[in-house]
Image: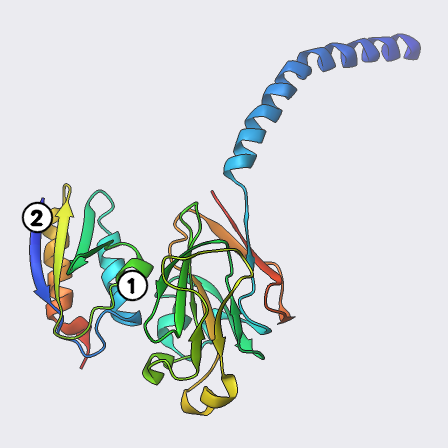
Amino acid sequence: MLEKQVTLTNGSGLHARPAALFVQAAARFKETSVKVSKGAKEVDAKSILGIMGLGAKQGDTLTLRADGPQEAEVVGELTALVEGGFGEA
Amino acid sequence: MQAVFGTESDALKEEMKRLMEPEGALLRMVFGLFGKKKAAVDVVCPLSGEVQEISRVPDPVFAQKMLGDGFAVVPSGGKVVAPVGGEVVNLFPTKHAVGIRTPDGLEILVHVGIDTVKLGGEGFRALVEQGARVEAGQTLLEVDLAAIADKVPSMVTPVVFTNLGERTWKLTKQGAVTAGDPVATVTQK
């Protein structure tokens, strides 16, 4: 299991488009379980509704928790997405 | 000759029938089991209005199906009902979108209007809370279309299957619909 904290930098938080990109990235790692939590709330990183339901906004800290054969890859990819602001200007 | 053939044919038919029967029963049983697993989920239209292809929604996040496949409704009334029975897993603080999960795990997002998150809840009233169990057709939201229509790019409402996975879906109705009308089915593969 691998755990990492990341901070949301993009303006719209984990809403619609960023949420879709995040879930698409996580879902590519079929064999690896990925959870995301904000405070006490933990959701499946592969669920659009779960991710949008976190209501994560700019400046919020998220904890990524991956468990499986590609845990380092998935955490690396999701971290890059979040810290890169999802490509938002 | 024909009579003999006929008799032979009848006998053959009987023989085949006898051979087929147990198999037929087995097949029916197998298909019965499959039938149960394949049970289609009926989806009702969450709003009254006109059904449209999701690709016509003026927001690429929806039009390009980034959140999933589905359809859209150009609303003529502000009542939003649950498209399926299940749990309200997601009710945004701004009440502009609601997500339902069926007991089978199918998730549907109803996103009322485009860029409506920016209204901060103005014009939206929720009749249920996050975590509530709802029936298909139960009213979830009331939207004051007249009050907000001019403040957003569009009130077209995408209805998105966010985790279809191996499931398939099809529209069963097009054009004018009333909230609560069956509009689509989702089938387990």
Q: How is the image coloured?
A: rainbow
Question: Does residue B145 lie above or below B187 as drawn?
Answer: below
Name of the residue lying farthest toward the bottom? B150
Q: Amino acid at mark 1?
A: Gly
Residue B47 found in image quarter: bottom right
Q: Quadrant of the N terminus of chain B?
A: top right
Q: Is residue A11 left or right of residue B185?
A: left
Residue B69 found in image quarter: bottom left
Q: Is residue B146 left or right of residue A62?
A: right
Output the chain of dot 1: A
Mark closer to the chain start, 2 or 1: 2
The image position of residue A51, as x and y in percent, is 26, 61
Which class describes the residues within 10 Å of circle 2: few (<14), some (14-19), or many (20+)? some
- Residue at 19%, 71% in the rendered image: A86
Q: Amino acid at mark 2?
A: Leu
Question: Does residue B56 lie above or below A51 as drawn?
Answer: below
Nearer to us of marks 2 and 1 is 1
- Residue B116 marker: none
Which class describes the residues within 10 Å of circle 1: few (<14), some (14-19), or many (20+)? many
- Residue at 11%, 52% in the rendered image: A73
Q: Are marks 2 and 1 on the same chain?
A: yes
Output the chain of dot 2: A
Secondary structure type for disc 1:
helix
Residue hosting label 2: A2
The image position of residue B169, as x and y in percent, is 51, 54
- Residue at 13%, 51% in the rendered image: A65
Residue hosting label 1: A53
Residue B4 found in image quarter: top right
Foreground: B16 or B24? B24
